[in-house]
Every structure is written in structure tokens, then in C-alpha cells.
Image: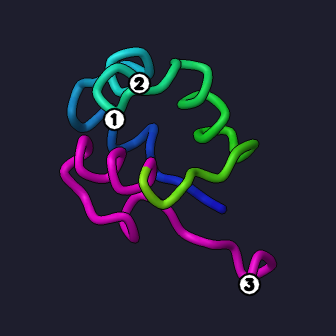
Amino acid sequence: MKTRMPELRARHGLTQDQLAKLVGVQRETIVHLEKGRYNPSLRLAYKISRALQSTTEEVFSFDDEDR
């Protein structure tokens, strides 16, 4: 899964820690998501998308290989 989280966080001036607090997870979870080591639950993907004022599809996308 690919993510645009770093780009969208920067656009909103958010650090990983700030985003983590907004969505109720630890900063390490955001780090793992951004590095592609962890796929979010649907609920977490929704919370992150809302916090970044984007749609889930804008924040997360599947690689062709993941389909």
C-alpha cells in the first residue's frame, strides 16, 4: 500500500506526533504507516483521512502488485 501521508501532513503543517494525537495512536504507528510497514484498519484510515482533510483514496492507494 502506498501513502501520501508525509506530503499531506506537510501541507497541513503537522508533525507525525501531532497527527498521531489527532487520530489517537502512537507516533510509531504513523512512522510505520508512512514507511509502508503497516496497513491501517478501515477506521484508522478514515480518521487519518479526516485529519488530513482528504479522502481515504487520496491518502492511501494500493500498488498493482497488492491487488
Q: Amino acid at mark 3?
A: Arg
- Left or right of residue 21, residue 52 in this image: left
Q: Nearer the viewer, residue 35 or 45?
A: 45
Residue under the point 45% across and 37% down:
6
Q: Nearer the viewer, mark 1 or mark 2?
A: 2
Left or right of 66 in this view: 9? left
* Residue at image point 25% right, 38% down: 11
Main SS, magenta region, reads helix
| Label whose residue precedes the other's in the sequence (3 or 2) | 2
Q: Give me the C-alpha separation between circle 3 and circle 2.
A: 28 Å
Measure how far apart labels 1 and 3 are at the Cα level.
Answer: 26 Å
Q: Which residue is mark 2?
A: 20
Colouring convention used in this rendered image of the protein: rainbow
Total number of numbered discs in the rendering:
3
Judged from the image, the secondary structure of the residue bearing numbered disc 2 is helix
The residue lying at 57 percent from left, 51 percent from top is 40
In the rendered structure, which segment of residues is drawn in magenta? 44-67
- Residue 29 position, x and y percent, is 59, 29
Q: Position of residue 67 (x, y in %)?
A: 74, 84
Q: Which residue corresponds to the image point at 52% horizontal and 18% vertical from the top-left?
A: 27
| Secondary structure of residue under mark 3 | loop
Tell which tag, 1 or 3, sits nearer the viewer: 3
Please, is residue 10 above or below residue 61 in the view?
above
**Residue marked by disc 1:** 9
Q: In the figure, 49 relative to 62: above or below?
A: above
Report how far apart the C-alphas of labels 1 and 2 lie in the structure: 11 Å
Please state if 36 lies on the left or on the right of 40 as rendered: right
